[in-house]
């Protein structure tokens, strides 16, 4: 009997609804629109339950310790604490919106039946929700992992008549099974057995020597890092799998599934620790995590600039954005061992930034993949060299793509700015503790500029450049309203995250405060950070003016106000000069007419930059690079 039925019953009911969806919806597969609606109804109902339970746990009603689900003689530990609740809410929101988007998007595949899709999609969500709910590395973890992995394999392989899709899915399956073996192996090396919770595993590590501890955490880092897509492991599978899957699936793979690897790393390095940290070197493992994060964000982002396929560009940039999260986690772990309160407060800020970027990335990357799906649906191509000029033909999609592009680039006052700046500043201010963290912070700051260049390319070549009028042999129009609604919802989330980050910082702080055994738990108790940190604006203590609850809202609102004032000043100056608009033909740099033969192509964008960083990889071969940049 569970002591918290108010949490367990909704979660189990949601999992049951998802299982029912996998059985019932394929029965309607012959009637595609009906199948999509029934599928969405089941998924939406389950996601409402997951979101309700998750937010309740995150906001103060989570379990204090794991409780056990009895499966005959076997017990599976279940833990729905604040951290689990936070991830359940993320899974629920993006899954429901992706299912809504899929109702019309799957019309793009008239030659493929919907039976496999509507059976595997809810099981995929079920596996992810179960993975952040079980609290072991043995049976419960295995069941959840295999449900998530096998169903996502079916979804990635959906266009099974294409050999490249079959290869991508097979590679994905093999590497995810390897990741499972590594994680389970780490639990076995720690002395775990069936039914041991992570807290129990941490207790078994007490007194273990440096060798066993290194083996345990090394195996778990590689296993969960492979799932999260960190460098160089993510490059082995992520771009291929994410780019060939149907776009609603790509949105879940990038926006949510990668976060299950992040969740595992959080549980291992911030919860599953020997009592008192006996023998665990937080500074060493924090430095390892931070170095992995810095390499991931730098190389993944530069590789994304080199892509001509819109969905591969988005996939490589997912690797880069995961790097920011891992850098924040590493900085928090490294700084957590300091005896100086101010340094430990920076550790708390770093983990806040990392988890805020988890929420932000789910929103803007989910939105970007749905946008990529809209491009494919409307034009029939993902090749940026064949797109262009769509801002007039698909204005709503262009607007939300602009919001997502600004957010992922970290332009103030977007959502990405708030989380990235929190991660970067916590690293830059940690010079007394680690000079390497400062260097990693500088690399992250530079990479944000590269991300902006990447999405200038993505948005510009898809929506504002010329091209589709010559290269796309079909009538292009805006996508159906059922595909627009999820994108509009995610764009609204991005805007709210950027303008009112204090709402999400408060949610994350509450989730961590309600997660027993968290390494930095004391920083998130009432008054834990109060007085340790303050924000100063032009010499005025914002903390004193607005109170601690609104500190995080001030900076983006000030930036937004300055932008509005600058725009108003520009309009006044323009009018005061008495200028008037004159329509003239576009200057074509010496060409007599604009056509497909003389428009700007992918290989010419940031060519010198890409050549300088050619050693980072990202193209399959020089021949493929010429083919991508050449005439379609």
Image (cartoon, rainbow, N blue to C red):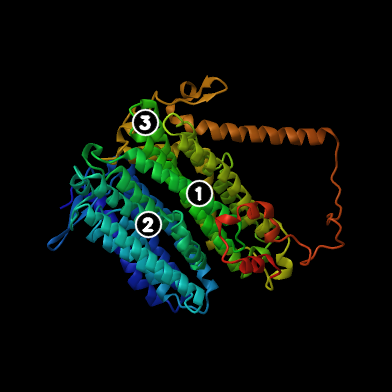
Of the numbered discs 3 and 1, the one sitting upstream in the chain is 1
Nearer the observer: mark 2 or 1; the answer is 1
Query: Alpha-carbon distance for marks 2 and 3?
Result: 36 Å
Look at mark 1 in the image and give the residue it sits on.
297
Residue 91 vertical placement versus 121 (above, below): above
Characterize the local packing of mark 2: few (<14), some (14-19) or many (20 or more) Cα atoms within 10 angstroms: many
Quadrant housing residue 82: top left
Q: Nearer the viewer, residue 352 or 62?
A: 352
- How far from the left and from the top, in percent, is residue 126? 33, 61
Nearer the observer: mark 2 or 3; the answer is 3
Query: Alpha-carbon distance for marks 3 and 1?
Result: 24 Å
Of the numbered discs 2 and 3, the one sitting upstream in the chain is 2
Look at mark 3 in the image and give the residue it sits on.
344
Query: Alpha-carbon distance for marks 2 and 1?
Result: 31 Å
Which quadrant is home to the C terminus?
A: bottom right
Q: Residue at x 28, y 45 (%)?
A: 81
Look at mark 2 in the image and give the residue it sits on.
47
Of the numbered discs 2 and 1, the one sitting upstream in the chain is 2
The kind of secondary structure element at disc 1 is helix
Total numbered badges shown on the rendered structure: 3
In contact (CB < 8 Å): disc 2 and disc 1: no
- How far from the left and from the top, in percent, is residue 556? 55, 35
Characterize the local packing of mark 3: few (<14), some (14-19) or many (20 or more) Cα atoms within 10 angstroms: many
**Residue projecting furthest to the left:** 73
Characterize the local packing of mark 1: few (<14), some (14-19) or many (20 or more) Cα atoms within 10 angstroms: many
Q: Residue at x 48, y 62 (%)?
A: 250
Q: Is residue 431 visible?
A: yes
The kind of secondary structure element at disc 3 is helix
Quadrant housing residue 433: top left
- How far from the left and from the top, in percent, is residue 33? 48, 72
Q: Is residue 42 visible?
A: no
């Amino acid at each position: 009997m569970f002591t918290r039925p108010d949490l367990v019953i909704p979660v189990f009911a949601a999992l049951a609804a998802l299982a029912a969806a996998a059985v019932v919806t394929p029965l309607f597969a012959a009637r595609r629109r009906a199948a999509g609606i029934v599928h969405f109804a089941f998924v939406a109902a389950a996601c409402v339950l997951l979101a309700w339970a998750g937010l309740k746990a995150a906001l103060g009603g989570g379990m204090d310790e794991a409780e056990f689900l009895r499966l005959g003689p076997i017990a599976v530990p279940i833990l729905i604490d604040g951290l689990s609740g936070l991830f359940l809410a993320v899974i629920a929101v993006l899954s429901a919106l992706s299912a809504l988007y899929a109702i019309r998007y799957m019309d793009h595949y008239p030659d493929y039946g919907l039976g496999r899709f509507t059976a595997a999609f809810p099981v995929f969500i079920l596996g992810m929700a179960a993975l952040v709910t079980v609290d072991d590395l043995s049976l419960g973890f295995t069941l959840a992992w295999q449900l998530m992995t096998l169903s996502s394999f079916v979804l990635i392989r959906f266009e099974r008549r294409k050999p490249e899709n079959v290869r991508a899915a097979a590679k994905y399956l093999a590497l995810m099974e390897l990741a499972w073996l590594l994680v389970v192996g780490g639990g076995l090396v720690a002395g775990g057995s069936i039914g041991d919770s992570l807290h129990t595993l941490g207790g078994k590590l007490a007194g273990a020597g440096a060798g066993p501890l290194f083996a345990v955490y090394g195996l778990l880092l590689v296993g969960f890092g492979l799932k999260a897509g960190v460098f160089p492991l993510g490059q082995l599978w992520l771009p291929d799998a994410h780019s060939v899957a149907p776009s609603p699936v790509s949105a879940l793979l990038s926006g949510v599934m990668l976060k299950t690897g992040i969740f595992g790393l959080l549980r291992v390095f911030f919860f599953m620790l020997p009592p008192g940290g006996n023998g665990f070197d937080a500074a060493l493992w924090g430095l390892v995590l931070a170095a992995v994060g810095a390499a991931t964000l730098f190389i993944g982002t530069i590789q994304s600039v080199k892509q001509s396929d819109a969905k591969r560009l988005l996939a490589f940039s997912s690797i880069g954005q995961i790097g920011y999260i891992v850098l924040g986690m590493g900085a928090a772990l490294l700084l957590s061992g300091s005896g100086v309160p101010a340094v430990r407060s920076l550790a708390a800020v770093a983990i806040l930034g990392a988890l805020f970027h988890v929420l932000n990335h789910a929103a803007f990357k989910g939105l970007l993949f749905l946008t990529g799906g809209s491009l494919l649906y409307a034009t029939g191509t993902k090749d940026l060299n064949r797109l262009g000029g769509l801002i007039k033909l698909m204005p709503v999609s262009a607007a939300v793509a602009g919001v997502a592009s600004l957010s992922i680039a970290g332009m103030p006052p977007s959502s990405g700015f708030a989380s990235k700046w929190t991660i970067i500043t916590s690293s830059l201010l940690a010079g007394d503790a680690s000079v390497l963290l400062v260097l990693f912070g500088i690399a992250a700051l530079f990479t944000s500029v590269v991300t902006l260049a990447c999405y200038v390319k993505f948005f510009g070549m898809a929506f504002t450049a010329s091209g589709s009028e010559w290269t796309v042999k079909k009538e292009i129009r805006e996508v159906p309203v059922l595909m627009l609604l999820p994108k509009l919802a995610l764009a609204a989330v991005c805007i709210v995250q950027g303008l009112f980050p204090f709402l999400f910082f408060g949610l994350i702080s509450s989730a961590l405060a309600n997660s027993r055994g968290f390494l930095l738990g004391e920083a998130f108790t009432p008054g834990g950070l109060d007085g340790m940190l303050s924000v100063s604006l032009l010499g005025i203590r914002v903390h004193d003016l607005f109170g601690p609850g609104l500190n995080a809202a001030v900076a983006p609102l000030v930036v937004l106000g300055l932008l509005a004032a600058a725009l108003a000043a520009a309009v006044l100056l323009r009018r005061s000069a008495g200028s008037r608009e004159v329509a003239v033909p576009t200057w074509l740099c010496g060409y007599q007419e604009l056509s497909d033969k003389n428009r700007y192509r992918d290989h010419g964008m940031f060519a010198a930059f890409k050549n300088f960083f050619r050693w980072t990889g990202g193209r399959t071969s020089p021949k493929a690079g010429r083919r991508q940049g050449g005439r379609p």
